[in-house]
Structures are given as structure tokens and as C-alpha cells.
Image: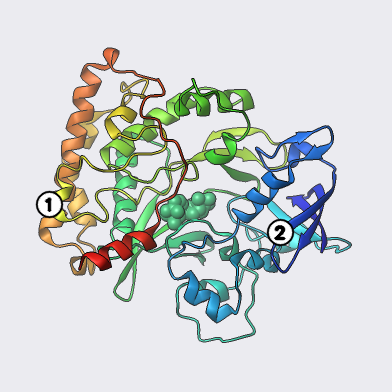
Amino acid sequence: MKCVLMHKKIPAAYLELDSETGYILKIYEVCRPEHLPVGVGFKKGIADRAALNEWWTDRAIPASRSGIHEAMEVLKIHDTKTLLTRCFGLSLSDQYWIKPDKSDVKWEAINFFDNPFSDDIGDVLFGNSNKTNGFDFSSPDNTSDGCLKKRWKIIDGKRCLVKGGSKPFQQQPFNEAIASLICQRLEIPHVDYSVIWSGDEPYSVCEDFVSSETELIGAWRVIQTRKKDNSVSVYRHYVNCCEALGVKNIERFLDRMIVLDYIIANEDRHFNNFGLLRNAETLEWIGAAPIFDSGTSLGYDSLTVQIANNKTAQCKPFKKSHIDQLKLATSFEWVDFEKLYGIEDDIKEILSSENAEKYIDEQRKNAIAQSVANRIEIVHRMAAVMENTIVDDVKNDVEENIAEDYLKEVDAHTLDM
Ligand SMILES: Nc1ncnc2c1ncn2[C@@H]1O[C@H](COP(=O)(O)OP(=O)(O)OP(=O)(O)O)[C@@H](O)[C@H]1O
Ligand SMILES: [Mg+2]
């Protein structure tokens, strides 16, 4: 299928797309190279097709998405990539889409920011569809990333992402709300998450932080813009890439992200869980995207006894150990520790919402609240000796960008039982 890669209203390139496999077979012409996805190389009039395919296939629902095999059976598809072309590849996180050649369909008429979308795909992904055919595929759920069960919903006129947790504790929705609370107290720009219930299951809900003018460029795309020298740390490479793009002082945001992630022992801040915002038409950089997706934290899949002093928690994206990553923070001056006093009670309240006791008992609740208090204390001590702590070298750098695979986790739990 011949089509145009559109960036909002701007044609960026003409492509040949295999609608069976969802693969880009050929790039005929690049008309606006500056509007190609960030990090897709363009040299001597030729765009890097492999990189463009990587970007395009990353738009599809990952094979590791919870419940995706059942959903694919219902939809009678073999590969989630085939869903991309069924909704013009439109998303609620950026402004790229695919227009069939010679079609006169307009962005204004089809984008999901201003137009309603179907609930069909979301219903299938949540396992509560009563349709077996005749699905309306016009949904941003076809282009949503991440492993947890999720769907977009229009709630009170606002585009919201509703996201579940993983077995056995379903802790991620609560963790998102706890991370929001910490961000709020420390005035860290963040997406506000709250916990909602559907039947017996908790979900987090947050508003879309992208508008019809802006878009999220994941840090993974940002670090594709330059070659990383082996002597440069992962952290410094990200800072250098931001600077080269014209985003100054990203360290200020990274300090906040690193401190939050230390306090909540975040295990999954991979390079698609933070990034930059830009204006999709002018390509002007707005700055760091607000903090989102902080749920894979607070010992979400650990036994209660392991939570209190969780020294084994994985760390991403810069260092393998949380304490090494904390040492990258350039300043703690902005952390108003007084604002965090008594936060344990608010954390316990979040963990007491509606049916929470089905998943999180009193001991677990206390362990989670105590672990936050302990880690705040460590940051406090670190802040006191700040001058001697900044260490930015390649030692213990994270080598790969891999998102947490909950299916693997669930399998491991099942095997343990
Ligand atoms: N509020 C939001 N507004 C716009 N886009 C969002 C928002 N929240 C998430 N996204 C986009 O959706 C993607 C998936 O969401 P999220 O990271 O919360 O899911 P996840 O399943 O927890 O991911 P992971 O695989 O990292 O565990 C994000 O990488 C981001 O591109
Ligand atoms: Mg994510």
C-alpha cells in the first residue's frame, strides 16, 4: 500500500507499506526530513529504513502486553502490527499517522485529540467485549505501548489512560498514586494518577499530557540522535543528546526523576518511561515530559518481608544500583524534606482504597509506607554530604533498554507456588 507518513498536517515521507505484515517495504521520497521521527537517520537524501521500521513497529502493542494473546484471538489477527493501519497509526501520545496515497482524509477529521474514538478495541483488550466481529478499529488503543493492560477512555470530556496492575498484588495502580503524591509534595512536574475500581480490580487513571499541539518524544528516540562513545556514561549521553537538540538544563529534571525513583525504588524507568515534549508543528522543544509510569516500584512483586529494606530492587535507566544512580543527582537543594513529613499516613490511606485489602494486607501496607520513610531518610543523609557524592562515570551503567516483562514475572510466581 502506497501511503504518506504524516506529521499532523505535514507530509514527511512517501512509503510503501505491507498491510499484511505492517512492514515498511520502501521509502519513495522524504519531503520534510526534519519531520521524520526523532532519531531516524537521514543522509544524502536517504532515510534509514531499518530505523524507521523500528520506530513504526514500536508503535504497535507489544507482544508482552498482558492479555494480548486472548485479544488477538478475538480480533482474529496474528500480529499487533496489523492494527496500526486500521486506525491510520494515530496515537494520543504524538502526531504521526499514515495516510493512504490519493486519500484526501484530513488530520482535523480523524485525530483522536479532537474526535471521539471507538471503545471496541479497549473492550477487547480488557477482556469484556461481547462482539465477535464488526469491530470499529478507530481507537488509540491500537498504538499504545507498554506491558500492562491499558486503554484510553474519554472521561468527562478528557482523554484518560486507564491502566491495570499485575499479579499477584495488583500494586502498580496504588504505586502510581503514591508517586503522584510524592511529586506533588516536592513540586515535581508530573502526571496525576488516581486509583479507580472496576469490579474487584484496581486501575490507575491519568489524563493525557499531550495535546493536539504537542507530542511526547521518548528518551529512547532522543538517545538515537547521536552515537554514544564508550567512555561517555549513559547519563551524560542523554544530557548531551538533549543539549544538541537544544534542550538545555535537562539535569534539573533528571535530578527530580532520580530522587523520586530512589524514594519509590522504581525498577522500570527505562528509556520509554520518560522523555521530552515538543510542539509537533514548529518542532520547538518544550522541555522534559512530566513524570509518568512510576508504578513498577515499591516492591510491587516482592514478598512483604523483602519490601522494608529492598536492596535488591533493579535500577534503570542510568545505573544498575539505586544508590549509584542517586549519586548522579547534581543538587538536592530543591528537596524540601519537611514537605515529606508524615507521608506514611497518606500512603497507607492510598493503600486502603475500596477493595485494596484483597491484595494488600496491613503488614504489606506498613512495609511499603516504612520503606518510603527509610529511603527519604537516606536521601536526606545524602543531601547533607552532597559535595562529595556526584559520580558520573561508566561504572555500573545500564547496558540495555528493556522494559519489565510482567508475563515472565507472573510465570515465575506461578512456578514458585
Ligand atoms: N498520560 C499520558 N499521556 C500521553 N501518553 C502517555 C500517558 N501515559 C502513558 N503514555 C504513553 O503510553 C505508553 C505506555 O504507558 P505506560 O508507560 O504508563 O504503560 P506501562 O504498561 O506501565 O509501560 P511499561 O512497559 O513501561 O511497564 C508510554 O510509554 C507513553 O508513550
Ligand atoms: Mg511504560
Instruction: Indicate the amino acid at tag 1.
Output: Val
Q: Which residue is drawn at 74% across and 55% down?
A: 24
Question: Which quadrant is home to the C terminus?
Answer: bottom left
State the image coordinates of residue 58 (x, y, percent, origin top left): 59, 53
Q: Which residue is drawn at 34% across and 35% down?
A: 320
Alpha-carbon neighbours of circle 1 within 10 Å: few (<14), some, or many (≥20)? few
Q: Can residue 341 be seen in this view?
A: no
Vertical arrangement, residue 325 with respect to residue 171, above or below: above
Which residue of the protein is positioned furthest toward the right in this rendering?
Answer: 102
Quickly name the residue at label 2: 23
**Of 59 and 206, which appears nearest the observer?**
59
Measured from the top left, where is residue 4 in percent x and y?
81, 54
Residue type, label 2? Tyr
Where residue 361 appears, x then y in whole percent?
14, 62
Side of 396 where 117 appears, left or right: right
Task: Please tell me whether mark 1 or mark 2 is closer to you in this view.
Answer: 2
Residues packed near mark 2 inside 10 Å, few (<14), some (14 to 19) or many (20 plus): some
Q: Residue at x 27, y 42 (%)?
A: 264
